[in-house]
Amino acid sequence: MRLLLVEDDDRVAAALSAVLGRHGFQVRHARSGHEALDALVPDGQDPYRVVLLDLGLPDRDGFEVCSRIRAASSVPVIMVTARADIRSRIHGLNLGADDYVTKPYDMGELLARIHAVARRGVAAASAPADGTQEAAPRGPLEARGVVIDRERRRVSVQSRDVPLTRKEFDLLALLAQSPGVVYRREQIFSEVWRSGWEGNGRTLEVHIGSLRTKLGLPGLVEAVRGVGYRLIPEQPADGPAEAGPTVDADTDTDAGTAGRGEAER
């Protein structure tokens, strides 16, 4: 998932880019409003899914940048700023920002908000042009020879149908939305189980293990120690992927606090 980070403080940008990179985001850093607007000009690459926009920029106010972005694009914008007053929040949202986060912030919450606005952006892009509520059909997702038909809720590997339980299907479909992007355990439980993950870590491990076994692709879903899981988009040419602090087995540091019971499969 491509993400545009608009931040004039190089130290803040470097730290944030490093964390986002470990979670599978492709980050481009823009240091000014002018650079940010230039970055949004189509360049033949995948479009940005989210813009993180600081308000205190050296060449122009972030509010103006947001207004110009919204006039030219529907890309979701999250304002990330130290301006915590309610008037600034209201002004930013009225200009078209999709969310407003004040510094200092919790990184887990910021990641959840990024995923949330990215999902809304995809949903808006697939909505019918006539404004009706009926959603346009969602095409299949494909990764590593796995085809996920979200309309029929069917999964196949190399043209072989693989029967999955409801939760297994929902889990795989979630991870396949953004291959390579790390989904935190909290987010997975919120979206698949509609509950908090505390006390249910073992349930997630069981479902991940079952997916690997049924699909016959043990390296498809990778655990990121202490964070969550991601779907590996391509088979590494030589051995396991070397992309951040990942492991193939489910050896998350706090898996020992897993719940005692199994949630619905």
Image (spheres, rainbow, N blue to C red):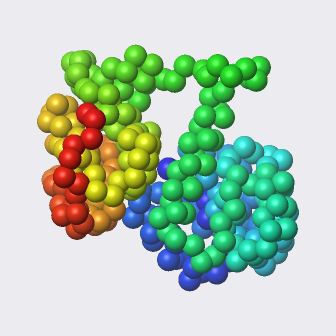
Report which quarter residue 258 is drawn in. Answer: bottom left
Residue 241 in view: no
Residue at 82% across, 64% down: 63
Report which quarter residue 192 is drawn in. Answer: top left
- How many circles with numbers are drawn on the protein? 0
* 79 is higher (above) or lower (below) than 16: above
Residue 248 at x, y percent in the picture: 18, 54
* 184 is higher (above) or lower (below) than 119: below
Residue 67 in view: yes
The C terminus sits in image quarter: top left
Closer-to-camera residue (6/77): 77
Q: Is residue 86 left or right of residue 10?
A: right
Residue 21 at x, y percent in the picture: 44, 64
* 215 is higher (above) or lower (below) than 91: above
Residue at 50% across, 69% down: 107
Residue 76 at x, y percent in the picture: 67, 49
Q: Is residue 136 left or right of residue 89?
A: left
Closer-to-camera residue (207/244): 207
Name the residue furthest front. Answer: 261
Closer-to-camera residue (230/257): 257
Residue at 56% across, 55% down: 114
Residue 196 at x, y percent in the picture: 40, 52
Report which quarter residue 240 is drawn in. Answer: bottom left
Closer-to-camera residue (257/243): 257
Residue at 19% across, 52% down: 260
